[in-house]
Image: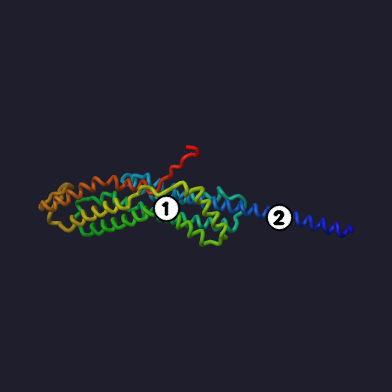
Amino acid sequence: MKKVLAAIAVLAITIVVGLYGLNNYRKTQKQQLEMTSHLLASCVNQGILSLFQLQANDWRKNPEFYLQQQRALNEAVEALPQKILDGKPFKEWKYAVDICDKLTRNSNLQHITIFRPLTDLASFEMSDAATFKNRKSLRKRKKTIGALRESAQAADRYLKDLRSDINTQVQTYGFSAEEKAFIQKQINTEILDYYQQGNFSLNSVNVYLERLSTFYKLMAENPKAYTVRSGSLYFYNPELRGKVEGLNRVILQGENAFFANYTQILVRKQISSPGL
């Protein structure tokens, strides 16, 4: 009888210890998943904060700002793991660090695609009348306008591309289906749910670029119809003068609106407080 009771006692202790161990394991797994998700959400947040800095920049006054922001974003993201990790690195954490690096690299590339062409457009070289007749300069202007069209496409789909990139990176690594769902939910809840695509108008940007392209093409294809004196244009052909002046007028009128588009690629949602 004593042996039976002893066996039962040992079994009970084993069960209790096992349940405690299982509970502790589950608790640890939950904490690790929360840290992993928070790291990725923080990483996404840093990329968005960088975009907002870029949106606020005056590209005519500070044309190299995208390079400053690239460095600042890299530094901010590099500091995240040390701030967030509690304990030793684990497998899923290492996945998250890798994903964070890739998301940051892609954000920087996207930001360069969107904003670097603005520096070329804002440069003196782009509007220098002394080079309007130069075919080489025309090719360079065409290249800039082409880059601006690509820039506009990237700006117009910024949030969609960001969500797609996050999903692709998370799916690539060895997270379980439950972990993937939790990570995506946390990134949305912590960060993405607070933002929406802004009032960036792809159509108005393309209209402006088309006018700009037509203007430069007219100037390059009619070199004998005008001359440049002290930076001003003098026309021998009244018809060309009318076309150029008309185009130049609408280009100048639309310039501020064009650059303003790039200040509203992404905006914060207006979230009402409960009960209001």
Task: Indicate which disc residue 34 carries.
Answer: none
- Could you tell me the amino acid type at mark 2? Gly
Identify the coloring. rainbow
Asked whether the viewer can see residue 193, the reply is yes
Nearer to me, 227 or 238? 238
Q: Could you classify mark 2 by the number of other residues whose Cα lies within 10 Å: few (under 14), some (14-19), or many (20 or more)?
A: few
Nearer to me, 246 or 106? 246
Task: Indicate which disc residue 21 carries.
Answer: 2
Give the CA separation, mark 2 to mark 1. Answer: 43 Å
- Could you tell me the amino acid type at mark 1? Leu
Q: Could you classify mark 1 by the number of other residues whose Cα lies within 10 Å: few (under 14), some (14-19), or many (20 or more)?
A: some
Label 2 close to label 1 by CB (< 8 Å): no
Tell me residue 120's x, y (percent): 30, 52
Q: Residue at x 21, y 59 (%)?
A: 135
Nearer to me, 169 or 97? 169
Q: Is residue 30 left or right of residue 137?
A: right
Q: Which quadrant of the rendered structure holds the N terminus?
A: bottom right
Tell me residue 197's x, y (percent): 40, 49
Q: Residue furthest front?
A: 275
Q: Residue at x 33, y 57 (%)?
A: 150
* Residue receiving disc 1: 159
Q: Secondary structure at mark 1?
A: helix
Asked whether the viewer can see residue 42, the reply is no
Q: Residue furthest right?
A: 1
Tell me residue 214's x, y (percent): 21, 55
Q: Residue at x 57, y 60 (%)?
A: 176
